[in-house]
Amino acid sequence: MTIALLSRRVTGAALLPAALCLPQAVSALGFSSTTTTVDKTHLVKHMADCGSFKLKQVTDDAAARTRSYWFDGICKIWVDHVKAGVAAPNTGESALWAEARVTWHSGASRLEELVKLTDPGKKHSGTLRSEFKCTGDPVVQDDPCVRLEFKNLTDWSGFSVPAEKNRPLLSRATTGAEANKLAAMNKPVSPSGRMAAQQVQTPPLPRGKTGAAGQSTPDATAQPGADMTAPGRGRLATLPAIGAALPDLASGARVVVAGKHSAASGAMLALPDTDARTTANGVCQVAFEHEVRNLGAAGSPASDRQWTVEGSPGAQVAQTPAIAAGAAVSRVDTIGLRPGVNKLRLRLDPLNQLKEASKANNEFMLTVSVAGLCGGAPLPPPQAAATDNLRFSPAQDGTAPAAAGRLHMPSGSR
């Protein structure tokens, strides 16, 4: 894989110095991409443009010698194709709602960056987590950094380019004067020295296409650089008050099925019964490895997660351990599937026992088509019924009670 930093537009490069002078505006992030070769004549570039972040709040902690920045904005992603040296039309364009928290530790010369990306289409949502060692605060200065850690928990490789270049995504995202101005707005509200949360309203943005109900929806055909709105609204959703720290559980962007098949939420997957852990009585026990993330600003206590298979009785419930803010845990759950189509749904906190910053990212759905018998006997061939003796068996008309020995999904998980 060849990684290249691309600049496709004048607005992303030539206007960079002027954009940095605008208050609270960030246009320095530009375009990035990863390039893969499909064949000798076909190049695919995964593009990302995060040039519209805005600084919303700054807080200082003198005792800990830290400064924290909060940003929000929009990242656009799309795919460029070049076939036989000729550029093909862009594909896969999408606008993601972005929220970022960046903390500079001056005592340790260390920068922590957490970016949460939310896709209205629920396909490319995820987080970017990184840590850098820098000679100075790179958010307000052009100081060199060295990457210590980076995790791209989305399915879009284009977001990895800044980190590969030892550059935080929000490098030089604001000026020192603007940051100091916002930091001074936070006043102690109690002897304990806690800061008041600033209620910052997101300015209205131009609307996308109008749906049948008159609601504004993201324009999926817009060119990169066009403003997008959140679904069903004429403006982007306002961030929760920073002072009200809450956990935010989210399912990972992908799961790994049977240890070898990676699938995104909403995908369809074909699986042979030979990939199951065990097979018996027409049921395949299949392993699903997935992540549970806490994207919130507060730790999450232990909670439940629930797997259901459409059309199958019962549900498998397992406990998820406590997760610190910004952390994630990986789990493998074993689900019983039958030959044919199985529609699965994973729900985090299914009984809504946790107070979270968002409940919109608590579900993961996947359709798995199992080929084979799963250890059962082949079905008998269909036989034509006599026309003078047509009957429906209790199993066909759904009136019979469930058999006492009916299989339920196993509860094995770790």
Image (cartoon, rainbow, N blue to C red):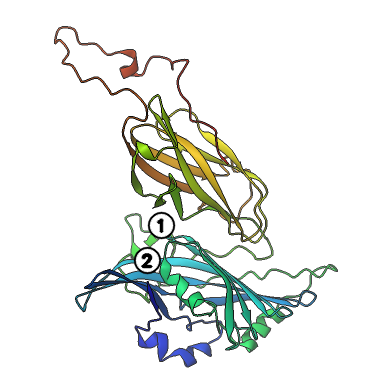
Which x, y percent locates residue 211?
33, 58
Q: Mark 1 points at which residue?
A: 123
Quadrant housing residue 57: bottom right
Q: Examine the rendering and report whether any part of residue 235 can be seen.
A: no
Mark positioned earlier in the residue sequence (2 or 1)? 2
Is residue 378 toward the left or the right of residue 67 in the image?
left
- Whether 396 is drawn above or below 209: the answer is above
Query: Which residue is rendered at x = 14% and y = 10% of the image?
Result: 387
Q: Are marks 2 and 1 in contact (CB under 8 Å)?
A: yes
Of 262 and 317, which appears nearest the observer? 262
- The count of marks equals 2
Quadrant housing residue 177: bottom right
**Residue flagged by tag 2: what amino acid is it?**
Ser
- Whether 283 is drawn above or below 79: the answer is above
Query: Which residue is rendered at x = 69% and y = 64% of the image?
Result: 243
Residues packed near mark 1 inside 10 Å, few (<14), some (14 to 19) or many (20 plus): some
Is residue 222 toward the left or the right of residue 262 in the image?
left
Quadrant housing residue 173: bottom right
Specify the farthest residue to the left.
387
Specify the farthest residue to the right.
191
Q: Which label was assigned to residue 65?
A: none
Of 17 and 191, which appears nearest the observer? 17
Element carrying mark 1: loop
Of 175 and 166, which appears nearest the observer? 166
**Residue flagged by tag 1: what amino acid is it?**
Lys
Element carrying mark 2: strand
Query: Which residue is rendered at x = 68% and y = 80% of the image?
Result: 109
Which x, y percent locates residue 131?
60, 72
Which x, y percent locates residue 382?
20, 20
Which x, y percent locates residue 27?
47, 83
Instruction: Measure the C-alpha gap from mark 2 to mark 1.
Output: 10 Å
Q: Name the residue under label 2.
A: 94
